[in-house]
Structure formats: structure tokens, C-alpha cells
Amino acid sequence: MQQTQTPAAAPAGKSSSFFPQQGKGNFFTPAPPMIQRATADCNDDERLTVDSAVSEAFSMITRAISIMDTVPLPPGVNDALFLSFRDTSGPTRNNVRRRLDIVRNNIRTATYQCVSSGEDGFGRCTSRSGKTRAAYTLHEGEGANTVYVDNIMICFPAFTTKSLAERAGTIIHEVAHYYLGVDDTGYFHDNCVESVRPVAATDEAHEDSGTEGDAPATRLFNADSYSCFVHFLTAMPPADMASRAAGYRGENLSIGAPDGTTIYTQTTFQEDPIFNIEGIPDMEGNQYHASGMRFKWVLHAGGTNFRMMSRNDAAASHLFDRDNTQAFVSNTVRGILEDRGVTSGEVVCTVMLPPQNIAGNTGQVTIERRLPVTIARGMDPFNAPI
Ligand SMILES: [Zn+2]
């Protein structure tokens, strides 16, 4: 029997506080469902914990469905679709809406089995890499032949260390596996932030590949995408969703030049001035980001496109690469500029966005940012002997 690794979806910070109270606006909050839930091997405390998580999950998914059914469609729906699936097309919206119904219809009748975090060992309540899981499901077969079997397993006490909203997200994640037949193609971070693809990972559909740059088809086959979609719609204020989505569409990108925009034709320190592409979402320092964006640079000067060097790659930066977030002009190029007497130019950064489907447009999206620079003859005075 194959087994799937299904840790908690675990988006942190979920809260439904921004929604209007019952009876106001277009939203409604359903009455708490009557719970007669099938559980197995649970003690009384564990059963109560599972019941409350399932009730919360049912409530969240019902709210998400009611928002999707609101006419006219609230703009947050498209932002949530973009953030979760990178796909705002009508067919995908209908598909997700239908799948949420399937999850909701089964979430209260599924059988949840309580298991001990310590006893299952490798691959179940503990991941391959030794991380603690809050829940898991088992499946047989692969791809389109995948069938989920047995019960939805809830790991105690690991499940209890999460907030109620996180537990509800975990329930949605596992029910999505079981009833939608979807796999794990990458886990979102807390608050459903994109996760970095490890350098060694080449298969975007691998469970440990992160979510960075995943194409819509991969995201539609990922259990975490559904729990995050519900999280976005029910816990993230629409303005925050719009802002985050704009970031992933590259709308905040610009070229920064903290050392100024003058390039001397002679220098002892090539990385001055440095040019940074700024406004990349989910950036750690200047290097690690999970935006899925790729960057390439040239210096356009005197009618020629010159290669620039990548600070993070120790290589030329003229090919798209996620590490090309910082670039500078080499001594070789500076020498040519001096020989040609060039006095000005433009630093050009081209950004390729990951695959996406915006309302049916699946074309490759590239964005260009330009920054005028001055090319000054002679030694950078910063380097000159005092
Ligand atoms: Zn999973």
C-alpha cells in the first residue's frame, strides 16, 4: 500500500473577524451543524477536539461557498483563485466551486480515526524528514488511479498543538485528499505564503518541491491549494488578498540602486554600484524568495546590450534565473564602455512570471523594468588612493 505524506495545512492566523455578523451584508454564517460524527479509537477529549475542528471547517467552507455564490462576484474571489491556483478562468472557478461542494458534503460524514503521534512512526504521524504531522490519509495507486482508503487519521497530541483555525484547515486538506483524489504537490507556509522550491527539486509535482512557481494544473491537484483557498476567502481581508495578488503579478517590481546610478569605467570593486530588483513577494534578504519569478539583466549602452554579472550566481545574468535578483557591471564591460566613449545607458531587468491563467489568458507573462544610468570615465573616486 502506498502512503501519502499529509502534514497539516496549518495556515496560521486564520480569523473570521473581518466578516460581517450574521444577517448583515451578502454573507451569512450558517448555524452550527448538529454533530453525530463517526470517529474511531478516539477518547472523549479527542472526539471533542475532532468535532470542533470539523464544525469549524464546515463553517469556513460554507462561508467560502456563499462568497463564491455572491452576485456580483466579490473581487476577493478572483484574488483567492489567483493566490491558490494561479487561475482566474471561469471553468476553473466553476470547478473549484463544485469541488468545495464535494468537500462540504463529505466533511461531516467522513470517519476520523484518532492515532497516537508516537506510535505510527515513519511516514504517517512523522514525515520522511522527521517532522511531526497533525494528520494523514493513506492511498493506493497513483495519479488518476489514486484511491484514498481507510479513515482520515488524526494524530494526537500533535493535532492539539494547533489553533482551531489551523485544525480546520488540516481537516479541509485531508478531506480534499480523500474525496477529490488530489495529492500533495507542495505545502504552503503559515498564512498560506508560498514556499521555496529546494534547489535539488526538479519535479514541481513532488510533495517536497514547495509551491513556488507551480503551474495551475499542479495547484489544482494539490490538497493545500483548497485549504488555502478557503483560508484566503474566510480569513484574509479582501484588501490584503488584492495586495498580495498584485505582488505576485509583479506590480511592485522596480530596480533599486542603493549605491547610486553612476558606473565608473574603472573600479577595484565591480559590485559597486549594485542593482537590485525590488518588490519581489516573500523575499528573505536579497536571495531567497518563493515568488517563482525569474530574472535576467542587460546593460543597454551605446547601442549594445552588455551582459551584467549576478551577485548571487557568480555568473552572467543574461539568462532567466531565480537567483538573478542582484546584478552589476564587470570590469571587462567597463573597459569596453571606456574604449567606446559611452556616457549613458539603461540597466534593464526582465522578469518572467510563473505559468498562470488570468481569465483564460495562459500566455507567458514577462515584465520589464528600466533604470537610466550615467557612465563616467575614469577611476571610481571611492576606490582612488587617499
Ligand atoms: Zn496532504
Image (tube, grey):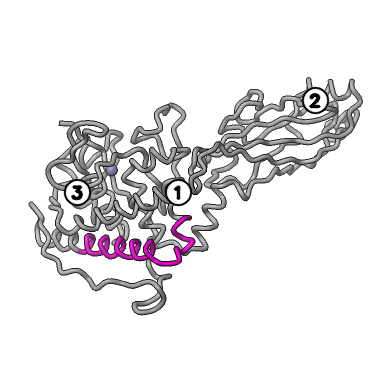
**How far across and how far down the image is residue 122, in percent?**
21, 34
Q: Quadrant of residue 24?
A: bottom left
Residue situated in front as seen by the camera: 371 or 195: 371
Q: Nearer the viewer, mark 1 or mark 2?
A: 1
Residue 217: image x %, image y %?
A: 39, 39
Q: Tell which tag, 3 or 1, sits nearer the viewer.
A: 1
Of the two numbered discs 2 and 3 in the rendering, the one whose residue sits closer to the viewer: 2
Q: Quadrant of the C terminus?
A: top right
C-alpha distance separating marks 1 and 2: 41 Å
**Sequence order check, earlier mark of 3 and 1:** 1
Which type of secondary structure does the marked residue at label 3 adopt?
Answer: strand
Is label 2 in a helix, a strand or a loop?
Answer: strand
The secondary structure making up most of the magenta span is helix
Residue 300: give x, y in percent of width and height. 78, 31
> What's the residue type where badge 3 is placed?
Cys
Q: Does the image show residue 288?
A: no
The residues colored magenta run 52-78
Give me the residue at 44% from left, 61% from top.
236
Q: Earlier in the sequence, mark 2 or mark 3?
A: 3
If the image is split into quadrants, where does the N terminus sit? Answer: top left
Q: Which residue is mark 1?
A: 89
The type of residue carrying mark 1 is Ser
Sequence-earlier tag: 1 or 2: 1
Residue on which the image places disc 3: 155
For disc 2, the neighbor class at 10 Å (few under 14, some 14 to 19, many from 20) is: few
Q: Amino acid at mark 2?
A: Thr
The residue pinned by badge 2 equals 304
Q: Quadrant of residue 325?
A: top right
Q: Secondary structure at mark 1?
A: loop
Specify whether tag 1 is near ligand 1 (CB below 8 Å). Answer: no
Q: CA distance from mark 3 to mark 1?
A: 37 Å
